[in-house]
């Protein structure tokens, strides 16, 4: 049984928790990011993104390059992700002014497209003759992919096809170069593959499907390709090692892949495209590879927060069970990509394990990537922070204690914005027979198969989810793996059916009232004994939320706190300040005090205390302080 995502996003109108986040993106994040793209944001690093498109257009008109190209080679993608986030926002919050801003930027992008369909400001401004000669580093196809995604989203949101036509022309150009003209190679950073498949879904253009399949099939067929490409040219972007095939996901053909490894974002973007191709072609061998890779991540290489990519060296997967909290890289983009991958796996196979991972990544790492005011962002998402060590020690330089306003490498902020704005695509899905509720999100949902419902819930802080059925059919509701108990009632009558692959399937009709009640009990979660850095540690969770302990709530020091295994836990809601509406958990604990020596044969004194935990995603919003997810435990 296959599921399709909710492609027509107007079918979901959010409310409550998700709507609040989407409203924050609309009112704060999108305008702020637009000002950054236009170099108008006070205090933010110069972006030059929009100016690059203007200068590229000047080159094509024969007027010169203005002040030239500035910034990262992949910066065109920042504009694309901004348009995509804005498109999703326009569906929920129609805004003529925002639409006009998008149209203006799209006009500049269209002006920067060459007559043959090529579109990339770096090469148009710098050197036309070097196009497609550095697939390893130069991100031409990566940028094209993000712009294709933006074009699809904007067309779906507004019906306007100017950017879509630009990117169809661009796709045909890439098709000519790599299929008709036989240019060797494949993208250094996967992205265009999944974008081409999305274009195919929207337009039916078979060249997009053929090109995506080509890039997936040739990856790793010649592991020496990037080495040969580098030797054939006399220039480089960063001077990366072209022989590091693990980093760039090209050490073996994709159908032979067994373990997730290399650059984490590149990995999950590629795996997403592979799973997406499976849903279009029913490639069973490829899907088996996807299942192996997903299992490798979920069972051996994923943080409790849904973060992936444990090492800063190459922003990469390390080895199985190497999941240190204090040096975790766990890039926001990687968890966004993990959600992409899990959602595409759901298209191929109904299994709640995929939605469980989506939920874990979203409510923890993705949301942690953005401050509660929408004005600052984390690129890296550690599970432990100690001011004075984090960001200072050579081994912890990448760990920062506060979210910066922007980055020179600004992939994460717009990535988080576009995912939050499009949350309905991941929460709901369908096939011709069944409407699927993968995650619990308030709002009105109209499925193309005829089912229509309104979901009411204050999840993830309340654990009762109510569905009011406007038009009937078959409904499939996920039972989360973390919920030790549950009860589902239809019109007050308990449904006694057993879940299938983690979903309850049942028929509903107009006027029915469905209520799902999940376990709201806080719980201690223990790590595998195979994770060496977490021996003797314990984590506090409630529902999908990982909780952390910050110094601001615990007398400035969480390092000396140990949780009692049988300590009393109480949940209470905060009603004021930055954390209004958030549930904190107090838990019985002890504080250990020593004599101040570096080492001592005298055991520390222990004092009973009540420790305070808050959801991980809100950490760092109240100033610099200690933070820890994995705590010591005592009996």
Image (tube, helix red, strand yellow):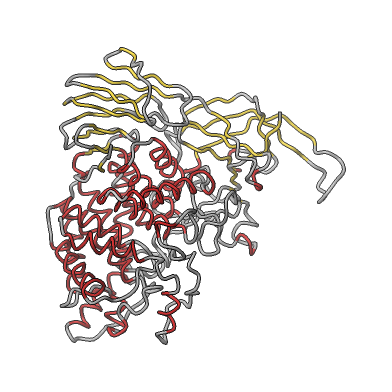
Of the 4 image quadrants, the one containing the C terminus is: top right
Position above or below: 247 against 95:
below
Position above or below: 183 against 580:
below
| Residue 328 falls left or right of residue 608 | left
Q: Position of residue 252 (x, y in %)?
A: 45, 63
| Residue 316 falls left or right of residue 177 | right
Of the 4 image quadrants, the one containing the N terminus is: top left
Residue at the outermost right position: 601
Q: Position of residue 391 (x, y in %)?
A: 59, 60
Q: Which residue is drawn at 25% across and 64% down?
A: 211
Instruction: Determine the image quadrant of residue 114.
Output: bottom left
| Residue 371 falls left or right of residue 95 | right
Q: Residue at x 62, y 37 (%)?
A: 538
Residue 185 shows in this picture = yes
Q: Where is residue 32 in the image (x, y as percent from the top left)?
A: 33, 57
Residue 574 shows in this picture = no
Q: Nearer the viewer, residue 64 or 556?
A: 64
Q: Nearer the viewer, residue 375 or 230?
A: 230
Residue at the outermost front position: 285
Q: Where is residue 386 in the image (x, y as percent from the top left)?
A: 63, 51
Position above or below: 93 against 269:
above
């Amino acid at each position: 049984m296959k599921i399709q995502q909710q492609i027509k996003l107007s079918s979901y109108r959010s409310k409550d928790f998700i709507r609040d986040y989407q409203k924050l993106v609309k009112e704060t994040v999108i305008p702020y990011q637009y000002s950054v793209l236009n170099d108008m944001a006070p205090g933010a690093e110069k972006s030059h993104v929009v100016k690059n498109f203007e200068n590229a257009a000047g080159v094509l008109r024969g007027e010169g390059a203005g002040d030239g190209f500035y910034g990262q080679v992949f910066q065109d993608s920042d504009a694309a992700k901004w348009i995509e986030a804005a498109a999703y926002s326009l569906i929920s919050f129609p805004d003529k002014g925002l639409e006009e801003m998008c149209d203006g930027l799209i006009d500049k992008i269209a002006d920067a497209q060459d007559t043959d369909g090529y579109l990339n400001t770096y090469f148009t401004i710098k050197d036309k003759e070097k196009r497609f000669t550095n697939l390893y580093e130069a991100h031409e196809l990566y940028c094209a992919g993000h712009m294709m995604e933006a074009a699809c989203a904007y067309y779906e949101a507004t019906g306007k096809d100017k950017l879509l036509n630009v990117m169809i022309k661009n796709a045909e150009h890439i098709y000519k170069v790599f299929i008709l003209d036989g240019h060797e190679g494949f993208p250094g950073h996967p992205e265009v593959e999944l974008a081409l498949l999305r274009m195919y879904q929207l337009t039916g253009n078979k060249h997009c499907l053929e090109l995506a399949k080509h890039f997936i099939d040739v990856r790793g067929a010649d592991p020496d390709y990037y080495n040969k490409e580098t030797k054939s040219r006399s220039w480089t972007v960063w001077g990366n090692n072209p022989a590091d095939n693990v980093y760039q996901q090209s050490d073996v053909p994709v159908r032979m892949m067994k373990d997730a490894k290399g650059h984490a974002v590149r990995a999950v973007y590629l795996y997403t495209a592979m799973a997406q191709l499976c849903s279009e072609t029913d490639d069973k061998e490829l899907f088996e590879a996807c299942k192996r890779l997903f299992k490798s991540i979920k069972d051996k290489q994923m943080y409790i927060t849904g973060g992936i990519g444990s090492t800063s060296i190459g922003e990469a997967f390390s080895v199985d069970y190497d999941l240190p909290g204090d040096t975790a890289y766990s890039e926001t983009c990687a968890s966004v990509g993990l959600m992409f991958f899990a959602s595409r796996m759901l298209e191929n196979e109904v299994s709640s394990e995929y939605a469980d991972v989506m939920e874990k990544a979203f409510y923890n790492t993705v949301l942690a990537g953005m401050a509660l005011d929408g004005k600052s962002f984390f690129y890296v998402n550690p599970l432990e922070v100690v001011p004075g060590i984090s960001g200072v020690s050579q081994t912890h330089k990448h760990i920062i204690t506060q979210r910066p306003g922007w980055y020179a490498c600004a992939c994460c902020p717009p990535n988080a914005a576009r995912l939050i704005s499009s949350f309905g695509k991941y929460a709901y899905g369908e096939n011709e027979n069944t409407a699927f509720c993968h995650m619990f999100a308030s709002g009105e949902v109209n499925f193309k198969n005829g089912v229509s419902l309104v979901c009411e819930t204050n999840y993830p802080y309340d654990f009762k989810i109510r569905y009011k059925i406007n038009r009937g059919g078959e409904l499939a509701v996920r039972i989360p793996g973390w919920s030790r108990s549950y009860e589902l009632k239809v019109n007050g009558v308990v449904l006694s059916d057993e879940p299938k692959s983690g979903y309850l399937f049942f028929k509903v009709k107009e006027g029915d009232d469905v209520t799902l009640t999940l376990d709201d009990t806080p719980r201690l979660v223990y790590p595998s004994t195979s994770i060496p850095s977490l021996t003797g540690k314990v984590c506090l969770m409630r529902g999908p939320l990982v909780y952390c302990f910050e110094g601001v709530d615990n007398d400035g020091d969480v390092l000396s706190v140990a949780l009692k295994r049988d300590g009393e836990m109480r949940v209470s809601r905060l009603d004021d300040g930055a954390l209004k509406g958030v549930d904190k958990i107090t838990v019985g604990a002890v504080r250990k005090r020593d004599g101040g020596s570096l080492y001592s044969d005298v055991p520390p004194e222990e004092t009973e205390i009540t420790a305070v935990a808050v959801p991980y995603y809100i950490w760092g919003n109240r100033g610099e302080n200690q933070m820890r997810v994995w705590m010591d435990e005592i009996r």
